[in-house]
Every structure is written in structure tokens, then in C-alpha cells.
Image (cartoon, rainbow, N blue to C red):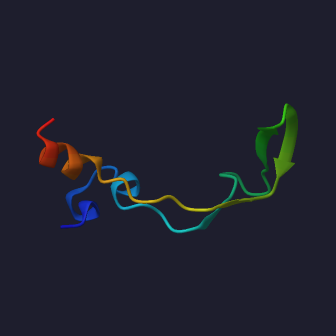
Amino acid sequence: MPVRKLGGPSYVLDGTQPHLIRPRRRNGVLRFVVDGQVVYSAYARHPGTRPNNFLARALRLGR
């Protein structure tokens, strides 16, 4: 059963697709530190994450 039906951190267990990260406020900017330099951007492209089903793995290993 997919974790998202159970509630909880499904983005960790199921992974995420590539997506845009936008500021919370309209006309806002994102602030990052890259190589010690402060960088501002209107959006960021997140590459997504791989699924990490650590719960099932821990249950299987008995930990």
C-alpha cells in the first residue's frame, strides 16, 4: 500500500518527481548560498528524489 494513503512522510518513502520550487510570497525571491556567495532567484529546479523505503527495509532486517 502506498504510504501516502496512510499519511506521513510519503515524499521520503515514495520519492518525488522533478519540480519547481517557488517563493511563498507573490513577487518574492529565493535566497541560496552557493560557493560562499549569496544568490537570489525567482525559482529553483529541484531534480526530485529517489524513494527510500527505510521502514520496510528495517522491518525485513528486524531492526
Q: Which residue is located at x 16 percent, y 35 percent?
A: 63
| Of the pair 12 and 6, the residue shown nearer to us | 12
Q: Does residue 58 appear left or right of residue 41 in this picture? A: left
Q: Which residue is located at x 23 percent, y 64 percent?
A: 5
Q: Does residue 48 appear left or right of residue 35 in this picture? A: left
Q: Which residue is located at x 78 percent, y 51 percent?
A: 28
Q: Does residue 9 appear left or right of residue 22 in this picture? A: left
Q: Does residue 41 appear left or right of residue 18 in this picture? A: right
| Of the pair 28 and 48, the residue shown nearer to us | 48
Q: Image quadrant of residue 42?
A: bottom right
| Of the pair 14 and 42, the residue shown nearer to us | 14
Q: Image quadrant of residue 1?
A: bottom left
Q: Position of residue 4 (x, y in %)?
A: 29, 62
Q: Which residue is located at x 82 percent, y 53 percent?
A: 41
Q: Position of residue 33 (x, y in %)?
A: 79, 36
10 shown above or below 54: below
Toward the top, the furthest residue is 36
